[in-house]
Image: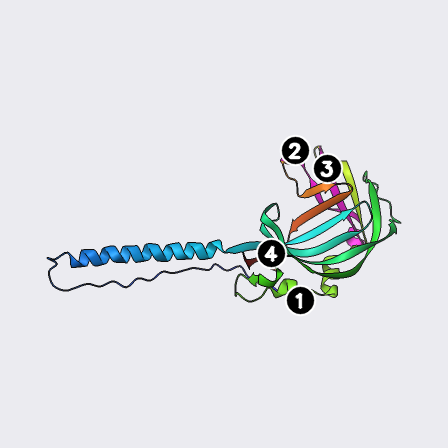
Amino acid sequence: MTTFRLALLSLLATGCFSGTTSTDTSGTDDTADTNDTQDTQDTETGDTQQEADTGTAQVVFHLTGGSDGNARFGIGAVEGTWDDPGEHGIVCDAYYELTSTGNSATPCTNGCDYAFDAELSGGANDGDYCQTLTQQSTGEPATFLAEVTYAQMYEYFPHPGFAFASNIAYPGSSQTYDLENVVYFWNPDPKNLGWGMWGYNFPANGTYPVSGDASSWEVLAGAADSYGDTIYYYFAL
């Protein structure tokens, strides 16, 4: 996966100041200083307007699905953060369709409403701002979304099925936790074989990353580069 390092952009305003080596008796220098102050204010106002025309989007994993057995899994860019999307929400999504192949041959024993086997099929880029996304560190086009391949997507999604539970009682080490709208992926890895939770709402903790209900739901989850750093893009408003 292409690695993008987080960088900070600085806008620097430079003013030109005039002066004199003679004794100031006319007030001319004071007048020049006042004008310089006005120039600085104008420059800062311009910079603020430029920043307002550019949004910041965090790279996320994006999964939607429902009781019809089909789903969509993608790597997207969301305005704001994955747990607090901004006004524009998902600004670009590179996704693949998950097509149901029928009810799962491996039942979900965790109180699931349903479980399906699924396979990856065709996909595309979708979103109003895909053409304007740029990498935060370089200003270059956001190739991470534009060039994602089927092989890469399968690396991110080696799960041939998903399941959903409206409510479960999850056994913790010292107490049981009541979770809602739990989305599971089937993990074929022998080391972690079974249904693993991809997302869930935890009302007691005030966290709700899963929106919708059993018939139609959506999950956003944070993604990171190979260093564990959050990946951001810019997009033009």
Mark nearer the N terminus (4 vs 2):
2
Badge 1 marks a residue whose secondary structure is loop
Pair 4/2: label in front:
2
Q: Distance between the residues labelled 3 and 4?
A: 28 Å
Pair 1/2: label in front:
1
Mark nearer the N terminus (1 vs 4):
1
CB under 8 Å between discs 3 and 1: no
Label 3 neighbour load within 10 Å: few <14, some 14-19, many 20+: many
Q: Which amino acid does label 4 sit on?
A: Gly
From the top left corner, tell me how far across and down residue 156 is, in percent: 72, 58
Badge 3 marks a residue whose secondary structure is strand
Q: In this view, does 40 lie above or below 107?
A: below
Q: Which amino acid does label 2 sit on?
A: Ala
Circle 4 residue: 228
Q: Is residue 199 visible?
A: yes
Q: Is the magenta stretch mostly helix, strand or loop?
A: strand
From the top left corner, tell me how far across and down residue 167 is, in percent: 76, 36
The quarter of the rendered structure image containing the C terminus is bottom right
From the top left corner, tell me how far across and down residue 230 is, in percent: 58, 55
Q: Is residue 201 above or below residue 10?
A: above
For the record, the magenta segment spans: 176-205
Badge 4 marks a residue whose secondary structure is loop
Q: Does 199 lie within the magenta span?
A: yes
Circle 2 residue: 204
Q: Residue 147 carries which label?
A: 1
Left or right, residue 90 beside residue 120: left
- Residue 201 position by quadrant: top right
Mark nearer the N terminus (1 vs 2):
1
Mark nearer the N terminus (3 vs 2):
3
Q: Distance between the residues labelled 1 and 2?
A: 40 Å
Q: Nearer the viewer, residue 140 or 28?
A: 28
